[in-house]
């Protein structure tokens, strides 16, 4: 059944508006009367004193933080330990992991000050554990001896016990029944509850179904235990949209609307049957518009009419929070319904900042200073309070000043509640209940097994441990109460102080050296629509490429030789300027290049944007490096009366041979590096992608590269071989297969005359090693991205996945389930995750490999491809890594299991391939990571993330062994390889003696 259409046009608001303009408005609205401020002070002070005097034996998280602040090594180790320990199934890895973390802190000398049970337990477990490990012992040796002395099981048991205690502190129950039992009203002022089923976002359809079932089951159970009070004095449930759909992302909107809306309506109807409070949690900023689409469509469903329990969470750290309230109010008004709105500050702040920087956005969707979030929270609270009773505001905070401010703003008419997280804010709300029994509060109560609690626990520990957090400051006796009472408006002071001085706008991430390339946030509908429109309008008319004849190739080299003299004499600053101009033009014409990458290279939207950005970054990075390296030269030290200068200069004519898989970025990188170093260039792009190359050369010429300095020769391998064999070339830069690199090397070696350098970047049989401490959801995301994105046609792509056998089944299941959710199809459709492979020949080769693997290996997943040059993702399990004999350049993943004690064999298998391009490691054991990094000769190693998408100047790219010669593209040593060095020594005393020395006197 198609979802009910939304009663309002979709939500839209500027994604990342200017902080200063927002601060002006917020500051102007923040002032209250002296009398009001006085009352806020009094109440907040009382609440803070209650928090500080609390010595409840069950302890709040405050106690634990007082003992192990996040800023200490112990605190960090504790957090990492908590995050991973409970999911490690095998004793060996658990012991290694515990020992690794204990070695980082000073738990032994950490005598506990607090009487709190929880803290004692943690400190005891960790302290006892640490004491059995003597200083100076090596990790492996220690584990061995510990096991002998009965130490390891004791350590493991004690630490697990401590982690369990932390789990029960933050989680109300492992099952909904247990949670309901624990939530049964006993106190004088019972709390309302909102139950939350723990877990990460769904990666697979099965996960989404499991979460749906868990929610549905919980609603039933909560409903039966809900009692007779009317809303809002009834329990509720909080649901996460990302748990209910495996591709809850903006580009999959159509699918999400068709599949998720009915699911949400179904759950909401169940909640309505018991008149519960049903809240949709708020997630990341790029999902906000999509969430509101889903929520609006579900809320409008006529079956929900007459029920006042539907609601959602709104994050005040988002700059769009005010507009979200307006939108939701409009919705409620239009449908003449009531809504329950939870106002939070927001739980993903660090993630939001990182994402905006990575995507090169124009600004941040969230505030960068906490006081701005606090200001906005109060502004949003005022808005919500004014919308009573259509809206029932729910203020979720553990901050005493925020609570006191809201009490003041709310007046005495009621119609709202506070909310806290289970395990936090207990003392504050206990005091509030004592002082103001009429004010209701609700406890957000996570429910789930300890295995599922990890991600949630880390969020809470991060939140509480952050220096800026109210809970951490309230727990720190050295922070005076006055500091906690400082108003956000006073902390900001003036609007121009709204931005954080240490968090530059994403565009300025690499300032003062260079500008970051601009990207697009797909979660911003307006930006995505604009881009898609520009791409459609940017299609270039079809053109035919004329392949060069050998005579034309010869002529190009001769012309380049002629052009070299003038170009190499052009000052480096001027050459750099031209490259920067080229970068700006590429940015202006981004849509046209994306259109070309899609039509000629079969690239998806995401891949195309990344590629254009990489090309832009190459231009700017090499311009910046070139200015530094090719300027006036470096003065060398020496005896008086003489000057010595070392300079770099171009070699002559460089031949640049580039591949089809990055037809813009690698092409541009090679060409601009050679040009920046003062060489003339003859570029030969892959014959599959000539138009992109032609357009890029045109752009470089327009930017100011003289026609004589840059020549394009279109053709196949044969013409490339002619260029390489030419006696007049001074260097070759090549990216492609190892075999062709070898041929080029032999051709160059066979020539008489000067020895010509070759910079070669070739392939790899890239591996990822995953041990039992890794988070399955993160592994699934990173494996799917690394192995299948770009249809696996990246030299960095993952080919061989080594999984510790204790966790292999669960990991494979999740990876295969996630692969099943990928959409193959037209790369011009933003919803497409995987486009075609480059041509029929590539497809044929890949299909032959798939056919062989189906015979020889265990098939875990075999996707179905549409007609055309498509190859669907496949996952095969091999008995031994050696069964994969060559690089397979497509979306085919090979899995090998390994026993925990046989990591050494894994490392040997990787070494035996002879390649060394990229490597992924997923492990929380630092020692394991360090050992692998030290041991393997691999050019780019990625720990606990995906292993593709190296960023220019951030992750210089290139490998060892069969994977290439180096130096790394996009790194500080690259340009030097394109140059020769010249030292000029001048005897400054030759005419008239050493006047400078004599003038120095005594
Ligand atoms: C009942 C309940 C339900 C919740 N549901 C959700 C939810 O659905 N979605 C969600 O995202 N969160 C949710 N949260 C988590 C919530 O976002 C945090 O608990 C809350 O932000 C902590 O705020 P505080 O007032 O208690 O603490 P404070 O210490 O006053 O505020 C901390 C908050 O300030 C913000 N902040 C910190 N540093 C900066 C900075 N440099 N610049 C800008 N802002 C900064 C962050 O939002 C941080 O969480 C919920 C919390 C509760 C209590």
Image (tube, grey):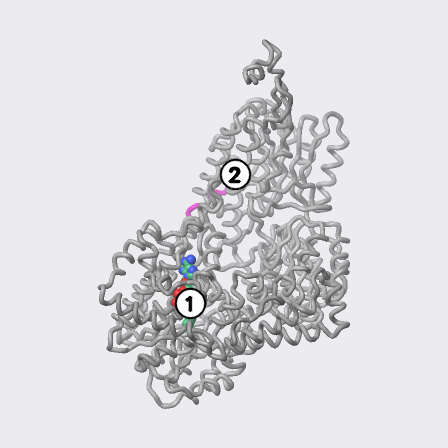
> How many numbered dots are placed on residues in this image?
2
Q: Which residue is mark 2?
A: 619
Identify the element where label 1 is drawn. Answer: helix
Q: Quadrant of ligand 1?
A: bottom left
Task: Mark 1 and ligand 1: say if the CB distance to the nearest ligand atom is below 8 Å.
Answer: no
Q: Position of residue 318 (x, y in %)?
A: 38, 61
Q: Position of residue 830 (x, y in %)?
A: 48, 57
Which quadrant of the rendered structure holds the C terminus? top right
Task: Mark 2 and ligand 1: say if the CB distance to the nearest ligand atom is below 8 Å.
Answer: no
Q: Which residue is mark 1?
A: 474
Figure check: 207 above or below 542:
below
The magenta stretch spans residue 542: yes
Looking at the image, residue 970 sits to the left or right of residue 297; the answer is right
Q: Position of residue 267 (x, y in %)?
A: 43, 79
Is the Cβ of the residue at disc 2 closer than 8 Å to that at disc 1?
A: no
- Look at the magenta stretch and give its main secondary structure: loop
Figure check: 369 above or below 985:
below
Which quadrant of the rendered structure holds the N terminus? bottom left
Tag in front: 2 or 1: 1
Whole-angstrom CA distance, mark 2 to mark 1, is 49 Å
Figure check: 790 above or below 43:
above
Stretch in magenta: 536-543
User: Where on the picture, by quarter, is residue 145?
Assistant: bottom right
Q: Is residue 713 visible?
A: no
Give the number of the disc on residue 949: none
């Amino acid at each position: 059944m198609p979802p009910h259409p939304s009663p309002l046009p979709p939500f839209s608001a500027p994604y990342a508006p200017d902080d200063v303009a927002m601060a002006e408005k917020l500051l102007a609205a923040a002032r209250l009367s002296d009398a009001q401020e006085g009352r806020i002070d009094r109440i907040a002070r009382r609440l803070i004193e209650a928090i500080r005097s609390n010595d409840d034996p069950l302890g709040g998280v405050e106690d634990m933080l007082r003992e192990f602040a996040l800023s200490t090594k112990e605190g960090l180790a504790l957090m990492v330990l908590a995050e991973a320990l409970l999911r490690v199934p095998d004793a060996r890895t658990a012991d290694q992991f515990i020992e690794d973390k204990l070695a980082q802190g000073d738990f032994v000398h950490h005598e506990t000050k607090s009487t709190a049970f929880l803290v004692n337990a943690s400190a005891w477990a960790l302290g006892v554990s640490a004491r059995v490990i003597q200083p100076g012992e090596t990790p492996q040796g220690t584990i061995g001896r510990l096991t002998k002395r009965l130490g390891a099981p004791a350590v493991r048991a004690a630490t697990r016990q401590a982690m369990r205690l932390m789990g029960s502190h933050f989680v109300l129950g492992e099952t909904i029944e247990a949670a309901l039992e624990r939530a049964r009203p006993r106190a004088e002022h019972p709390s309302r509850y909102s139950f939350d089923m723990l877990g990460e976002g769904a990666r697979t359809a099965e996960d989404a179904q499991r979460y749906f079932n868990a929610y549905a089951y919980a609603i039933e159970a909560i409903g039966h235990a809900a009692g007779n009070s009317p809303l809002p004095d009834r329990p509720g449930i909080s649901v996460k949209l990302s748990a209910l759909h495996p591709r809850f992302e903006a580009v999959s909107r159509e699918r999400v609307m068709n599949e998720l809306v009915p699911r949400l309506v179904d759950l909401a109807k169940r909640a309505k049957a018991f008149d519960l409070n049903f809240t949709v949690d708020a997630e990341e900023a790029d999902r906000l518009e999509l969430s509101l689409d889903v929520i609006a469509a579900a809320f409008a469903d006529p079956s929900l009419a007459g029920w006042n329990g539907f609601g959602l969470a709104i994050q005040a750290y988002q700059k769009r929070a005010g507009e979200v309230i307006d939108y939701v109010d409009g919705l409620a008004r239009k449908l003449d319904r009531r809504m329950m709105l939870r106002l939070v500050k927001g739980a993903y702040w660090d993630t939001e900042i990182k994402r905006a920087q990575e995507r090169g956005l124009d600004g941040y969707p969230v505030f960068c200073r906490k006081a701005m979030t606090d200001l906005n929270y109060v502004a949003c609270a005022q808005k919500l309070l004014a919308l009573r009773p259509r809206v029932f505001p729910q203020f979720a905070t553990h901050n005493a000043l925020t609570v006191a401010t809201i009490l003041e703003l709310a007046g005495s008419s009621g119609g709202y509640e506070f909310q806290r997280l289970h395990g936090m804010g207990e003392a504050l709300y206990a005091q509030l209940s004592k002082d103001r029994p009429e004010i209701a509060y609700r406890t957000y109560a996570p429910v789930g097994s300890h295995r599922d609690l990890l991600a949630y626990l880390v969020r809470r520990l991060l939140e509480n441990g952050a220096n800026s957090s109210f809970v951490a400051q309230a727990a720190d006796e050295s922070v005076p109460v006055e500091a906690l009472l400082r108003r956000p408006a006073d902390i900001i002071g003036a609007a121009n102080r709204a931005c954080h001085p240490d968090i530059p706008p994403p565009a300025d991430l690499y300032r003062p050296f260079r500008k970051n390339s601009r990207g697009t946030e797909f979660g911003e509908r307006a930006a995505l629509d604009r881009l898609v429109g520009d791409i459609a309008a940017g299609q270039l008319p079809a053109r035919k490429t004329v392949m060069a004849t050998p005579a034309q190739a010869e002529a190009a080299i001769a012309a380049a030789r002629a052009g070299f003299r003038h170009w190499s004499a052009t000052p480096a600053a001027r050459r750099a300027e031209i490259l920067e101009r080229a970068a700006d033009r590429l940015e202006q014409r981004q849509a046209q290049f994306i259109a070309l990458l899609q039509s000629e290279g079969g690239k998806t939207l995401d891949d195309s944007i990344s590629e254009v950005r990489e090309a832009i970054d190459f231009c700017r990075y090499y311009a910046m490096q070139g200015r530094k390296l090719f300027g006036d030269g470096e003065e060398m030290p020496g005896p008086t009366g003489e000057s010595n200068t070392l300079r770099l200069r171009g070699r002559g004519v460089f031949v640049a041979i580039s591949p089809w898989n990055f037809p813009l970025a690698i092409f541009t990188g090679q060409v601009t590096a050679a040009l920046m170093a003062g060489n003339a260039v003859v570029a030969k792009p892959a014959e599959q992608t000539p138009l992109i190359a032609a357009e890029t050369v045109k752009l470089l010429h327009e930017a100011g590269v003289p026609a004589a300095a840059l020549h394009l020769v279109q053709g196949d391998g044969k013409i490339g071989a002619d260029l390489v064999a030419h006696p007049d070339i001074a260097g070759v830069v090549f990216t492609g297969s190892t075999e062709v690199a070898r041929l080029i090397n032999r051709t160059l070696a066979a020539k008489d005359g000067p020895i010509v350098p070759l910079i070669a970047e070739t392939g790899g049989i890239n591996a990822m090693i995953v041990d039992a401490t890794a988070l399955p959801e993160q592994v699934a995301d990173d494996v799917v991205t690394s192995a299948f994105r770009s249809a696996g046609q990246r030299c960095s792509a993952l080919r061989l996945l080594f999984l510790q056998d204790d966790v292999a089944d669960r990991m494979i299941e999740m990876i295969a389930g996630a692969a099943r959710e990928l959409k193959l199809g037209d790369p011009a459709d933003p919803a497409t995750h995987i486009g075609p492979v480059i041509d029929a020949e590539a497809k044929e080769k890949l299909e032959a490999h798939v056919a062989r693997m189906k015979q020889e290996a265990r098939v875990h997943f075999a996707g179905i491809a549409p007609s055309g040059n498509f190859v669907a993702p496949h996952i095969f399990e091999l008995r031994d890594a050696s069964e994969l004999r060559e690089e397979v350049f497509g979306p085919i993943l090979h899995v090998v299991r390994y026993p925990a004690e046989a990591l050494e064999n894994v490392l040997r298998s990787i070494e035996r391939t002879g390649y060394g391009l990229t490597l992924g490691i997923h492990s929380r054991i630092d020692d394991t990571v360090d050992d692998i990094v030290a041991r393997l000769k691999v050019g780019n190693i990625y720990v606990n993330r995906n292993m593709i998408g190296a960023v220019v100047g951030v992750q210089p790219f290139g490998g060892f062994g069969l994977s290439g010669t180096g130096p790394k593209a996009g790194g500080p040593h690259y340009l030097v390889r394109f140059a020769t060095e010249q030292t000029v020594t001048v005897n400054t005393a030759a005419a008239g003696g050493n006047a400078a020395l004599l003038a120095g006197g005594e």
